[in-house]
Image (cartoon, rainbow, N blue to C red):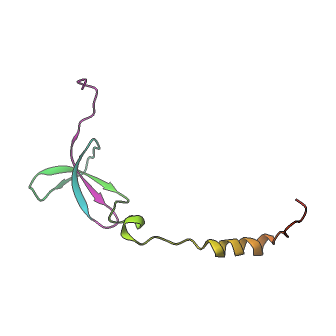
Amino acid sequence: MKPGIHPDYHPVVFRDSATGDAFLTRSTATSERTIEWSDGHTYPLVVVDISSWSHPFWTGNQRIVDSAGQVEKFHRRYGRREKGGAR
């Protein structure tokens, strides 16, 4: 690798703001906030809005869209078009 052109790659703690869960990994992300980790070292803390602990896809709390209800709502609002009618 060419020296001097790559960002600093260092240990960082990411914390999910919704659940409070945190994990230590390596990243180029930086932060002024710090946290003392269980190993006794202090690391930069990056707070994220969503992680695998709070994302609906991973938690199984996906919202099911009622597409049939939305179609009926559209037809009530704007009316139905007859088959074979003039376009």
Going by the image, does 82 lie left or right of 8?
right
**Residue closest to the far right:** 86
Q: Which residue lies at the image location 26% right of the left edge and 47% below the top edge?
A: 32
Picture layout, residue 51 above or below residue 72: above
Answer with the quarter of the image where residue 68 lies: bottom right
On-image quarter of the C terminus: bottom right
The residue shown at (45%, 70%) is: 62
Which residue is more in the foreground, 44 or 24?
24
Residue furthest to the front: 84
Residue 21 falls in image quadrant: bottom left
Residue 48 position within the rendered picture, expressed as x and y whole percent measured from the top left: 34, 56
- All told, the count of numbered labels is 0
36 magenta-colored: no
| Residue at the (62%, 71%) spot, across then down | 67
Q: Main secondary structure of the magenta part?
A: loop
Residue 39 image position (x, y, % from top left) = 9, 56
The x, y position of residue 24, in whole percent, is 20, 54
Tell which of 36 and 2 is nearer to you: 2
Left or right: residue 22 compared with residue 80 = left
Horizontal side of residue 82 vs 28, given as left or right: right
Q: Which residues are magenta?
A: 1-20
> What residue appears at the point 52 percent right and 72 percent down from the top-left corner?
64
Q: Is residue 47 left or right of residue 67?
A: left
Residue 1 in the image: x percent, y percent?
A: 24, 26
Whether residue 27 is situated above or below residue 59 in the rendered picture: above
Q: Is residue 2 magenta?
A: yes
> Which residue in the rendered view is the most extreme toward the left?
40
